[in-house]
Amino acid sequence: MLQIDNIDVYYGKIQALKGVSLTVNDGETVALIGSNGAGKSTTLRTISGLLRPKQGSILYDGKPLDKLASHDIVRMGIVHCPEGRRIFGSLSVNENLRLGAAAQTDANLTEKTRKDVYELFPRLQERANQQAGTLSGGEQQMLAIGRAMMSQPKLLLLDEPSLGLAPLLVESVFDIIQQIKERGVTILLVEQNAWQALEIADRGYVMETGKITLTDRASALLTNPQVEQAYLGGAV
């Protein structure tokens, strides 16, 4: 579904990604793990068209993405749920969800998707008319994911969905990610909580200082001594 081949990405004169290559197959959950500043979020921002690679290529279903505008990439089925939630705090939950469907033209399908989102996140339905900025951190993360789902993604780019959440809410968020996968959505997951990410992923990539340094089945990465020491806090 997604093929990234040898991309270099810069912020001004600073090189953030150095020859990054990775693939995501239809129906997979792929985890991209690494420390702060490794380039994980930059990778997602480049896929979604917010940044442009200086060299290399990005193909989605065999079609090049690297020169398309972000809204055109969304219409192709790639939806980015960014780090930090980025909800519209002064708008209601329902209004945030409607904005997530801005690229959709079928009103009936949009309404069906909204009902699906509320089925996935019953707590959001309870707060449908509440101002989004007054939600708890966990509820705001649910809203960010729900808003992304309103665009009916085929490939969902999730950036640090558990960031800043209490452990109980982290479990809930990862359960929801599993449910989204079961609904047929392919997922590329960036997550500092490496253990949780690899637990639900099919495959994983390890990124360090802008480079992919290791890739394997997620189950193999969970028992890899190098990954255990660097990202899993010792033995699992």
Image: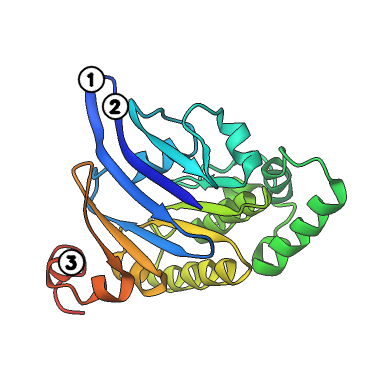
Determine whether the residue tagged by mark 2 lies in a helix, strand or loop: strand
Q: Residue furthest front?
A: 62
| 144 left or right, relative to 41 | right
Residue 87 position in % (x across, y down): 57, 43
C-alpha distance separating marks 3 and 1: 31 Å
Asked if the residues shown at circle 1 and circle 2 are in contact, with their CB atoms under 8 angstroms apart, the answer is yes
Give the residue number, with chain letter if any, for mark 1. Answer: 13
Asked if the residues shown at circle 2 and circle 3 are in contact, with their CB atoms under 8 angstroms apart, the answer is no
| 230 left or right, relative to 45 | left
Residue type for callout 1: Lys
Q: Which mark is residue 10?
A: 2
Identify the residue at horizontal 71%, vertical 69% (top origin).
119
Identify the residue at horizontal 52%, vertical 44% (top origin).
62
**89 w.r.t. 231: above or below:** above
- Quadrant for the C terminus in the image: bottom left
Mark 2: few/some/many CA within 10 Å (<14, 14-19, 20+)? some
Identify the residue at horizontal 57%, vertical 59% (top origin).
142
> Can you see residue 105?
yes
User: Which residue occupies the foreground of this view, 194 or 121?
Assistant: 194
Residue type for callout 2: Tyr
Determine whether the residue tagged by mark 3 lies in a helix, strand or loop: helix
Give the residue number, with chain letter if any, for mark 3. Answer: 227
Residue type for callout 3: Val
Q: Earlier in the sequence, mark 3 or mark 1?
A: 1
User: Which residue occupies the foreground of this view, 78 or 83?
Assistant: 78
Residue 220 position in % (x across, y down): 25, 75
